[in-house]
Amino acid sequence: MNPTSTEAQRPLALVTGASSGIGYELARKLAQRGYDLVVVADNAEKLTEAARTLSAVDEPTQVEVVHADLSQREGVKKVYESVQALQRPVDLLAANAGVGVYGGFSDETDLEEEISLINLNVTSQVHLIKLISRDMLERGAGDILITSSVAGVLPGPRMAVYAASKAFLRSFGQAIRNELKNQGVNVTVLMPGPTDTDFFERAEMQGTVVDESAKDDPAEVAEAAMRALAGGDDHVVPGAKNKLQVGAAKLMSDQAKAKVHGKQTQRKH
């Protein structure tokens, strides 16, 4: 992390999907490290409560709340306009917002939900990162954290569109990192495995093998992300089990990887 703000002004971090889970923990870790925050989520009640808690993490922390639906272009514009109104540069962007859809692609899932997933997980990320990275490039400084997933290297039966969206983010993040790395802007891709958040409930994955397996602590995932950003790493896979899975995936065919992932997304009962 390379904040550019002067000593008189704390650096500013923009965190999407910040009302709970990994996003909330990323915001909390950043507050602990002296950042002011702009926090974004689509659930106004949960976001307001999260902001109240985040304000208390470190007494000087300023927390700006932006309630926005990032699956809509207007939501991304609202976030960017809110940031511009602060007349402060974004030193760090944690592009974390995302959602999952569970079920067989051809006969179980709803197309509109999957289109919304693509709009949130992919389109909004490209849109917001385009706007923020341009500003960072102009200043020659900044950090971007993109939340992908170990699913980004594992084709996902019963989560086909979700896994593909995370593969997109992984590839996208590595590409723009290469473009920006010699211009003062660092890009790090976060690739968590199953984490103890409300993701599985929201995706209606209760009772699946992966839902009932051991999950990582979102605070530990966020801490790993902070260390990776500080080190300028290209990506980070938190947790030994997840590192092994990603390492093994490099030696497997796509069909073999799909088979492994498919066993995890089966319902146990």
Image: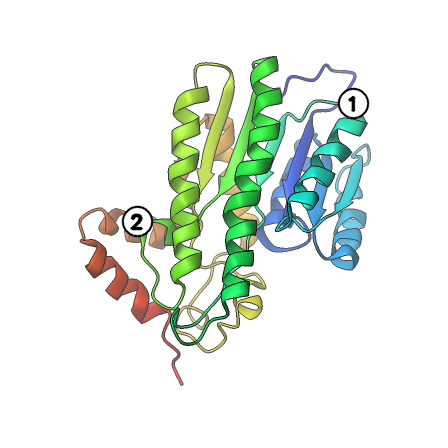
**Which residue is located at x 60 percent, y 33 percent?**
93
Secondary structure of the residue carrying tag 1 is loop
Q: What mark, if any, has residue 246 been given in the picture?
A: 2
| Residue 68 x/y as whole percent | 72, 48
Density class for disc 2 (Cα within 10 Å; few <14, some 14-19, many ≥20) is some
Q: Is residue 261 left or right of residue 256?
A: right
Q: CA distance from mark 1 to mark 2?
A: 41 Å
Q: Quadrant of residue 86?
A: top right
Q: Which residue is mark 1?
A: 87
| Disc 1 crowd, CA 10 A, few/some/many (<14, 14-19, 20+) | few
Pick whichever, 87 or 214, lies toward us.
Answer: 87
**What label sits on residue 13 in the rendered view?**
none
Amino acid residing under circle 2: Val
How many numbered marks appear?
Answer: 2
* Quadrant occupied by the N terminus: top right
Residue 82: % across, % down: 77, 35
**Colouring convention used in this rendered image of the protein:** rainbow
Point 36% across, 75% down: residue: 266
Question: Vertical placement of 76 versus 215: above or below?
Answer: above
The residue lying toward the viewer, choosing from 90 and 54, is: 90
